[in-house]
Amino acid sequence: MAEIIVGELARRLGLRVPELVLVDFDPAVAANEPHQEVQDLLHASTGLNLGMDYLPGATDYTPNGPHTPDIDPTEAARIIWLDAFTANVDRTTHSPNLMTWPTSGHQRPRLWLIDHGAALVFHHRWNTAADTALKTYDFRHHALGSHQPEMAAANAEFAPLITTELLHEVVSAVPDAWLTDEPGFTTTTDVRNAYITHLTARAAASTHWLPTEFPPPTKRTGRRRG
């Protein structure tokens, strides 16, 4: 659920996320696979899966790498704001979960956001979710924290955009089949409404959880673009 909700939320806020699609996987694909481990994985994936667009030639984000894009304080702050809002603590200097693309030709390389499965941690314990609406998270080790993020500006831009209508649209992208049998809920509509209620409350309280502590700016080394 988090991958869809956060990914589509990021896209609607103007951040770059590879296209997400639902894929109905046929186990017959595994019939001629010679490796048992791969066969087991393919069989376990039978049914509805989430697929992500392939960015040919994309590379992992590496500070000062050969294809690393220039990141200004505004872009850094927007991405950090999304992560703070959705409680995504899995975009660190050790695990950025950012891709750089394109890496060839004349187009300028840009950052693409991936892997949001660890976000929305509140949905693992719905009975205490309301208690985390104001919770702050430690972003001192965020992958983009050293880019002097302008968090107040990002908050002023993004917080008003988190409307009930927007959240309805994003949460509706999650298939009903993935929301059934959720403990504590009677219907899938109840589950969707719980996401909307929590995220609405968190957006309204953005000044309480807005990150403010980051490492000092990193010295940029000269990079040769080829």
Image (cartoon, helix red, strand yellow):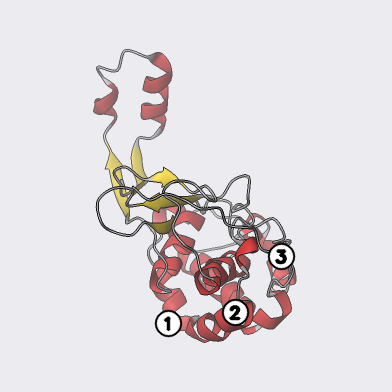
Q: Residue at x 58, y 71 (%)?
A: 81
Q: Please tell me which residue is depicted at 31% across the width and 12% down the height of the picture.
A: 34
Of mark 3 and mark 1, the one earlier in the sequence is 1
Which of discs 1 and 2 lies nearer the camera? The answer is 2
Rounded to the nearest angstrom, the CA distance separating label 3 from label 1 is 33 Å
Q: Residue at x 63, y 50 (%)?
A: 93
Relative image position of residue 67 (x, y in whole percent):
41, 49
Q: Is residue 53 visible?
A: yes
71 and 34: which one is in front? 71
The crowding category of the residue bearing disc 1, from other C-alpha atoms within 10 Å (few below 14, some 14 to 19, many at least 20), is few
> Is 189 placed above or below 43 here?
below
Whole-angstrom CA distance, mark 3 to mark 2, is 21 Å
Whole-percent x, y for residue 114 in the image: 46, 52
Give amino acid for label 3.
Phe
Q: What element carries label 2?
A: helix
Residue drawn 39% across and 67% down? Answer: 11
Q: Which mark is residue 143?
A: none
- Number of the label disc, if any, that sits on residue 165: 1
